Each structure stands twice: as structure tokens, then as C-alpha cells.
Image (tube, rainbow, N blue to C red):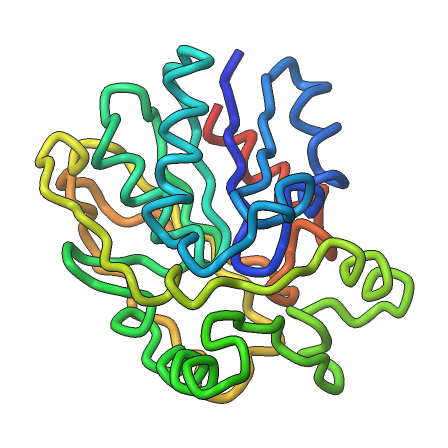
Amino acid sequence: MSTYLLVHGAWHSGRCWERMVPSLTSAGHRVLTPSLTGYGDRAHLLGPDVGLDTHVEDIVGLITEEDLTEVVLVGHSYAGLVIASVADRVPDRIAHLVYLDAMVPEDGETAADVMPVTRALIDLTLKSDSGWRVPPLPEMPPPMGLFGVTDPEDVAWLRTMLSDQPVRCLQQPVRLDDPAADAIPRTHIHCTVGKPDGFTRRPVPAIQPNGTPAQVWELPTGHDCMITMPAELAGLLLKLA
């Protein structure tokens, strides 16, 4: 049995994984889908002091409190920053890192460094009435839709779990200074449909930090593949068990 720890991205909550969890649990694996501070059942904790460091502490705390080991740690989108930082903090507990259409940072980088278009969101937020709330991206015509979701019923369901992102999450840098984390194997899963202008993806280096060839898989769907292709995503993750 493996333990899958699935970390949602910006604006979402742990509910976004609901459709794919049964495929993992029916195969005999443990699955955890926490909502980060400020989202879902923790939305009441949203505030200007919530940042990347807060979310890293959320996941490190869960791993240590539950005494989790051999974790397949999956980070979607913004959560690529989170899982990279978590792996640096507790590398001995992580069996595999999965960057799911995610930001992949280097030491000292912020979200704006990894994806420069994010700088525009930060600037708009700092000039806004709140000064810290980053609202979810607007729905666009297909194939972009709402985070790549285009089916009207799916869009309506997705809207029930979206909330604002604190700008501090996009401003705080990752800290990646434990060389032990380099030994953790990585898999990158890319969604190939409906990328908005400016949201460019860094090329994945041919060789992983642990010296093995890069493993990159693709899903022919939009960004929120856990909603649009849950069975297919679960099938890929099961290959890592």
C-alpha cells in the first residue's frame, strides 16, 4: 500500500480530487486530500498573513502528525512550490514527487520567478482595495474554460470550491537547500489543452536531480485534469505505487 498525498493548487480546495480518489483507494492505497489554510473547510483562516510558508507547514505538519512515510506527494499548479519545499524539509518521508501541471522552482524562487505572468496578478492585487486578495482567474471560452474545465455542470461544481488566493503565496520564495531531496524521483504530468496566453511552461531537464532520465507524461485535457480526466490521472499515479 502506498500513501498518496494530493495537494491542490491556488484558489481550489481538497475537494477537487474527489472524482479520482476512488480509483486509488480501490487499488488498496491510502489517499489524503487536505485543504490548505484559507481554502475549503479552512476558508475561515484566509488572511493577508497566509503565504507559501503557511502551506508548506500545513503539509509538513500533516506528514509528521500522521507519521507518514513512503509518500507519493502530488502538487497541482501552484502546489509545485509547496511540494518542492516539503520534500526539502522531510526528504526521508517522500518516495516520489509528482508535479501535476505545476510550477517547478529552483532554490530562492517565487511563483513570479517560475511563471513571470504571475507578476501581473501580484501588481493588480497590491493596487486593489484589499491589497492582498487574488481572485480566481475568470472563465474563458473553450478550450480554456475555467481552469481548463468547460462542461457547464463541471464548471458549476468547480465554482463551489474556489476562493481567493493570498498574494503572499505568490511572493514568498522556496527554500531548497537539503541535498537529500535531490535523491527523490520525480514525475511531471503535463496537461496539453487550453493554455492561456503567457502561461508558458519551463522545459523539464532531460536528467532529474537524482541522475536518472526525466519522466514526463501528458494528458490531453485542460489544467484541472483531476476534474476532466480523473480516471486517466489516477491510472498514471497508480504506475508509481
Quadrant location of residue 110? bottom left
Quadrant location of residue 89? top left
Q: Residue at x 28, y 49 (%)?
A: 214
State whether residue 207 is above or below residue 171.
Answer: above
Q: Residue at x 74, y 39 (%)?
A: 18
Across and down, in percent, residue 189 comes to 47, 53
Is residue 101 or residue 165 the one in the foreground? Answer: 165
State whether residue 186 is above or below residue 140.
Answer: above
In-image side of 231 versus 215 (left or right): right
Q: Residue at x 65, y 26 (%)?
A: 24
Across and down, in percent, residue 90 comes to 25, 26
Is residue 172 or residue 19 the one in the foreground? Answer: 172
In-image side of 195 versus 132 (left or right): right
Q: What residue occupies the far front of the structure in this picture?
A: 129
In-image side of 70 versus 211 (left or right): right
Across and down, in percent, residue 80 comes to 39, 52
